[in-house]
Image: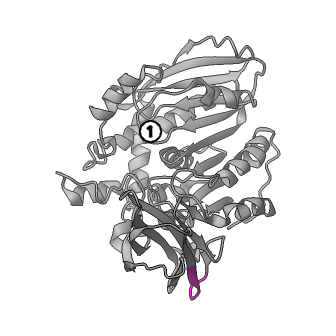
Amino acid sequence: MYILKKWLGAFLLLGSFCSLHAQLTITPTKSEGIFSVGETARWNIELDKGTAVDSVHYTIKNGGLTVLSEGMLNFPKNLVQLQHRFTKPGAVLLEVKWKSAENKWQHAVGGAIADPSNISLSEEKPADFDAFWEQKIGELATIDKQPQLQQIILEAEADIEYYHTKMRSIDQSHIRGQLAKPVKGDELPALLIVQWAGVYPLQPSWAVDRAKEGWLVLNINAHDLPIDREQDFYKDKREGSLKEYPAIENEDRNKSYFLRMYLSCYRAAQYLTERADWDGETLVVMGASQGGLQSLVTAGLHPKITAALALVPAGFDTMGPTVGRKGGWPNWYTNTKNKNATKVHETSRYFDVANFIPAIKCPVLVGIGLLDATCPPEGIYAGLNQLTTFKELLLLPASEHQSKEGSQDAYHHRVDSYWLPRLKNKTFHLK
């Protein structure tokens, strides 16, 4: 179900879905960016009047990977048009690069997608995928959580209880995070927040702001690290033991860095269901990028998740390059330096978010960046096409991986004005 609401109209008009730079603008002739097989996507590429640029080069790539056409661009009248005719379902990414007057390379992007509901998986999930994860969850269950809560007094938040949390996980590791809840309220809906990629501290407001809305909030660190140390601590980890952490043990499904991360999400959700102040009904998981990855994985693993909200989710389509399209971060297929590539590829299939999707039984909201080269849209759609439950997929036509000039506002508006309030108040209706 691909939903384009009237409320989105204001966002569609904003900026006409241009990729804006000081010197060059890419404007699609079809603003929403969705086509049918047989249709032609077109982009107007315009130079600002009086602008001097050099070596303007373009590429159009299938799935953000396979070059379909490329060349140099000339601007006799400050405007040129490029086009691509779709012969099959999928996405294309247009990239234009040029040298500015300061001799610095600049770039702008455009994109289009055809028949997203008919995009297929790059590869089916392993035959023993479900058995593998059932075994790992069983092993996790033998480890006592031993949850610890340290209350932190926030003088400016008298109506909110705030804690640092810690509990045991696999391989003698720990899950660390923050818990916040309203002082008043014995039975609360629960919200699990999971974090984007990187190594950094957790800010109290990330949990407290949602607790102010009436949620029992648990926000967990993706790493087994304290959540409130000085910036130099995290810098040392980023440049040291956690440098390129996605590649850690990526040749072995039993040792991959993501095994602990995925199981930590499951355990965090389970912990919320066991708290006396949970309402016993509503358990939402949400995150962006790596957090979107974790959100959808958690929904596929834990049966009590009642909704999953994911923005530009990572981790889809690990075997995408085998069918000519780029896989999502962390790029398992090419992350093979000094590794056995065959083993890395095989291991990746057990962590591909697409393979968790068939088990999801709750409603799902996903924001997908049409221009996202980090987590390309084609593989995300392929994975989400397996959903049999209610889904609302928002294609964000002006969005790369990071929000620019409000390119992801439509997703945040939908989260804050519809999904979270209605899930919290038990008034969410499938439609």
The amino acid on which the numbered mark 1 sits, given as a three-letter code, is Leu
Q: Quadrant of residue 182?
A: top right
Q: Quadrant of residue 259?
A: top left
Q: Position of residue 33 (x, y in %)?
A: 61, 72
Q: Bounds of the magenta span?
A: 36-42
Relative to 311, residue 81 above or below: below
Q: Toward the viewer: 369 or 245?
A: 369
Q: Quadrant of residue 341?
A: bottom left
Q: Position of residue 105 (x, y in %)?
A: 38, 59
The residue that appears at 30% across and 42% down in the rendered structure is: 244
Q: Position of residue 184 (x, y in %)?
A: 78, 18
Question: Is residue 218 in view?
Answer: yes
Q: Residue beneath label 1, please?
A: 263
Q: Toward the viewer: 296 or 246?
A: 246
The residue that appears at 35% across and 56% down in the rendered structure is: 331
The residue that appears at 70% across and 19% down in the rendered structure is: 160
